[in-house]
Image (spheres, grey):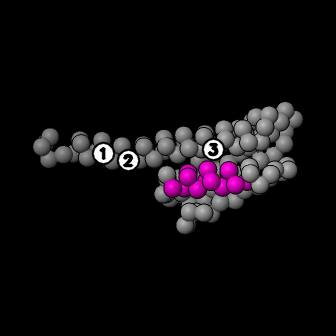
Amino acid sequence: MTEGVATQLHFNLPVDDELRESLETRCQALAAEFPEITHIDVTLAEDGAGCAASGHVTGKNTEVAGHANAPDPELAADKLLDTLRHQLRRVHDKRIFARRREAQRTHPRRT
């Protein structure tokens, strides 16, 4: 795993090693893309129509959660991680671009 990032995967249904490794790889990629992440928690469980996946990501000034349903556990996990990545991208971009907009407003040439 990426240094400093705790990843917990919970399975309330039978999964194979290929799915487990795929989830770990995707979590590593998520942690590499967003260095502010410190903890990733993913849970896969059966529901009436197939599989439900829920996840929670925390980090420095960051906290996002997501949920996805699909007939297949792998598809549910992919949807969940895509949702979490999208939410993290929005939070990350807001933080960065807010600083840039503020710097542009207070630039010495503009005053």
Pointer 1 and pointer 2: residues touching (CB < 8 Å)? Answer: yes
User: Which badge, 3 or 1, is on the more N-terminal residue?
Assistant: 3
Residue 16 appears in view: yes
* Between 106 and 33, the one nearer to me in the picture: 33
Relative to 41, 111 lies left or right: left
Snapshot quadrant of residue 49: top right
> How far across and how far down the image is residue 13, in percent?
85, 49
Q: Main secondary structure of the magenta part?
A: helix
Quarter placement of the N terminus: bottom right
* Between 75 and 49, the one nearer to me in the picture: 75
Task: Please name the amino acid that badge 1 sits on.
Answer: Arg
> How far across and how far down the image is residue 63, in percent?
57, 51
Can you identify the residue that label 2 sits on? 96
Q: Secondary structure at mark 3?
A: helix
Magenta segment range?
A: 20-32
Q: Nearer the viewer, mark 3 or mark 1?
A: 3
Q: Secondary structure at mark 2?
A: helix
